[in-house]
Image (cartoon, rainbow, N blue to C red):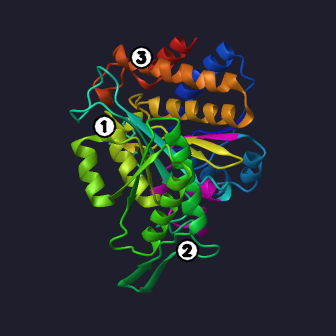
Amino acid sequence: MHVVVLPGDGIGPEITAATLAVLEAAANRHGLNMNLTHEVAGHESLARHGTTVRPGLLETVQAADGLLMGPMSTYDYLDASKGGINPSGFFRKRLDLFANIRPARTYPGVPHPTRHDFDLVVVRENTEGFYADRNMARGGAEMLVTEDVCISLRRITRPACARIAEAAFRLAATRRGKVTAVHKANVLTMGDGMFLEECRRAAANHPGVALEEVIVDAMAALLIRDPSRFDVIVTTNMFGDILSDMTAELSGSIGLGGSVNAGTAHAMAQAAHGSAPDIAGQDRANPLSLILSLAQLLDWHGERRGQGAYSQAARAIEAAVAEAVEAGELTPDLGGPLGTKALGQAVAGRVR
Ligand code: ATP
């Protein structure tokens, strides 16, 4: 498997190094044929190449199977004309990574702010919605009409709704067989109405999977009240962005939030959180978000290529993470004593 590694900004280089230690252990243990290309994006690329995504990087990534990307300080990149491209949005759009799969679960012994243990997955549409940087063929979808008037456009298309709904139902069929479609169709009657139509169509094709429909504001309350009642949650881009940070934090820490951005030909492992500049360079960041994202990427590759060793390596990494956290091998965000590097080594040791 050929993977391009982009460490990113803030805590990115630290959690990427910890993740690569786990990858090395998994590759040795499971006989994976890994080929890594180390590149840069974000601030380091801006300093070296004058742009956060250098010309030619897309082609390098397209030639690979996958991308392991550390968090980017996207808030710093507001002006594309000055080289400030959002690398995350760029690759999601250019590689058509339409499904952002964000699991969240609690672990025995790990403190979490809900009374309930839970295990759910947020399936978030990734290529359109309320994201001004990716929902137009040319130009942005935010317009300043006067200095005091702004219009932001949200794009919803039937094919994008259909494929994200299908991804959610397929996933639910391998889990507890329930999809919750989260929407605001009472206000966005056409866009979210279309999204719901496609969810219902997917439900008709998957008779073994139940569909429930919940309005997004009610969903926020229900998730806090009892996240254990949910299995797979499917939703449009921005709702999924917000709810999945919430579900990661409900599981104990946003630092446990892994994700994969999957398309048909490529996938990108990426932590659900941002670059955490407040703790960067202090060996305090929780690397499990990116380690779990790596496991998802290996699993995606294993399934797509029919190569069981990659899926077995993914299961071994997830099991090592569960064993480590249950043994109290935790970073400070979860009240633990370990640094980023030490936790990466602890998980790598368990994989070995
Ligand atoms: P950005 O602008 O890149 O989104 P941010 O600080 O606004 O950065 P996050 O990076 O998501 O947003 O951080 C939100 C909070 O969660 C911060 O207090 C940060 O320290 C914490 N946090 C995020 N990721 C981790 C992690 N892996 N381990 C520990 N704490 C984290």
Q: Which residue is mark 1?
A: 228
Q: Residue at x 28, y 59 (%)?
A: 217
Instruction: Check residue 250 in the rendering and tell me which mark sits there, or answer none.
Output: none
- Give coordinates of residue 285: x percent, y percent: 41, 32
Secondary structure state at the residue bearing disc 1: helix
Q: Residue at x 26, y 27 (%)?
A: 111
59 vs 111, left or right, is right
- Are the residues at dot 2 and dot 1 in contact (C-beta closer than 8 Å)? no
Give the residue type that dot 2 points to: Gly
Distance CA(mark 2)–CA(mark 1): 39 Å
Say whether residue 71 is magenta.
yes
Secondary structure state at the residue bearing disc 2: loop
Q: Which residues are magenta?
A: 66-93
* Dot placed on the residue nearer the N-terminal end, 2 or 3: 2
Instruction: Check residue 140 in the rendering and tell me which mark sits there, or answer none.
Output: 2
Q: Is 133 located above or below residue 73 in the figure? A: below
Q: Quadrant of residue 85?
A: bottom right
Give the residue type that dot 3 points to: Ala
Instruction: Check residue 324 in the rendering and tell me which mark sits there, or answer none.
Output: 3
